[in-house]
DNA sequence: ATTATGACCGTTG
DNA sequence: CCAACGGCCATAA
């Protein structure tokens, strides 16, 4: 992050709660969507950015999810960003927490086992936000497609 | 308006 | 199997 601007700038989290100047056309920023989903994550459960993105209706990309989490710390109520990991189950965002170890600590407190900064039973503790509308379409995708190469 | 970056993901080499 | 690249949408300069 060389030219890292300022993600938690007033135009991010602040906007989510209180509309400022940079958001007129949109009543709510896409941050709110992410926050809402993340807050839905049950305790002791984790999810991936991609899952959140899909839960958001694919309107966003995993990257935007992570970017939105930047304002999570300033969001109200606080967003359990520690329950959000990448598809590899790694605590990629731990570095962005007040303390790099805080994310792991929180997860362990909830009963999630962390191994080498990664979720042990990631697939087990993994929680899918679920797509209410595209629920039926989800079946068509068949999860058995897990095979990689 | 254009360029560059990002708490990612999937495919290609 | 491991490494590298591009794609995706949004924000900041």
Image (spheres, coloured by chain):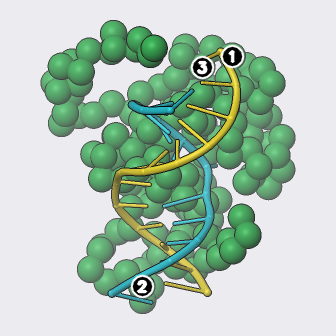
Chain colours: A green, B cyan, C yellow
Q: Please, is residue A146 above or below residue A72 in the view? A: above
| Image mark for residue A120 | 1
* Nearer to the camera, A10 or A145: A145
Mark 2 packing: few (<14 Cα in 10 Å), some, or many (20+)? few
Q: Which residue corresponds to the image point at 44% horizontal and 38% vertical from the top-left? A: A50
Asked which quadrant contains residue A45, the reply is top right
Q: Position of residue A64 (x, y in %)?
A: 47, 56
Asked which quadrant contains residue A46, the reply is top right
- State how far apart marks 1 and 3 are (Cα): 5 Å
Left/right of residue B1 with respect to residue A118 in the rendered view? left
Q: Where is residue A27 in the image (x, y as percent from the top left)?
A: 30, 73
Mark 3 packing: few (<14 Cα in 10 Å), some, or many (20+)? many
Q: Which residue corresponds to the image point at 74% horizontal and 40% vertical from the top-left? A: A103
Left/right of residue A127 with respect to residue A3 in the rendered view? left
State the SS at label 3.
Answer: helix
Q: Which chain carries label 2?
A: A
* Nearer to the camera, A57 or A142: A142
- State how far apart marks 2 and 3 are (Cα): 38 Å
Left/right of residue A128 with respect to residue A113 in the rendered view? left
- State how far apart marks 1 and 2 are (Cα): 41 Å
Report if the CB atoms under discs 1 and 3 are less than 8 Å apart: yes
The total number of labels drawn is: 3
The residue carrying mark 3 is: A122
Q: Which chain carries label 3?
A: A
| Image mark for residue A105 | none
Q: Mark 1 lies on which chain?
A: A
State the SS at label 1.
Answer: loop
Q: Position of residue A106 (x, y in %)?
A: 74, 36
The residue carrying mark 2 is: A22
Report the quarter where the N terminus of chain A lies.
bottom right
């Amino acid at each position: 992050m060389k030219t890292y601007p300022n993600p938690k700038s007033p135009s991010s989290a602040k906007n989510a709660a209180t509309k400022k100047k940079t958001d007129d056309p949109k009543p709510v920023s896409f941050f709110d969507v992410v926050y809402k989903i993340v807050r839905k994550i049950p305790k002791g459960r984790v999810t991936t950015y991609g899952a959140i993105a899909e839960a958001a209706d694919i309107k966003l990309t995993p990257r935007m999810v992570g970017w939105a989490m930047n304002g999570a710390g300033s969001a109200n109520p606080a967003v359990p960003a520690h329950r959000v990991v990448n598809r590899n189950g790694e605590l990629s965002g731990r570095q962005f927490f007040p303390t790099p170890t805080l994310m792991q600590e929180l997860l362990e407190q909830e009963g999630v086992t962390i191994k080498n900064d990664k979720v042990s039973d990631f697939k087990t503790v993994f929680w899918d936000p679920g797509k209410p509308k595209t629920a039926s379409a989800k079946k068509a995708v068949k999860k058995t497609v897990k095979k990689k190469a």
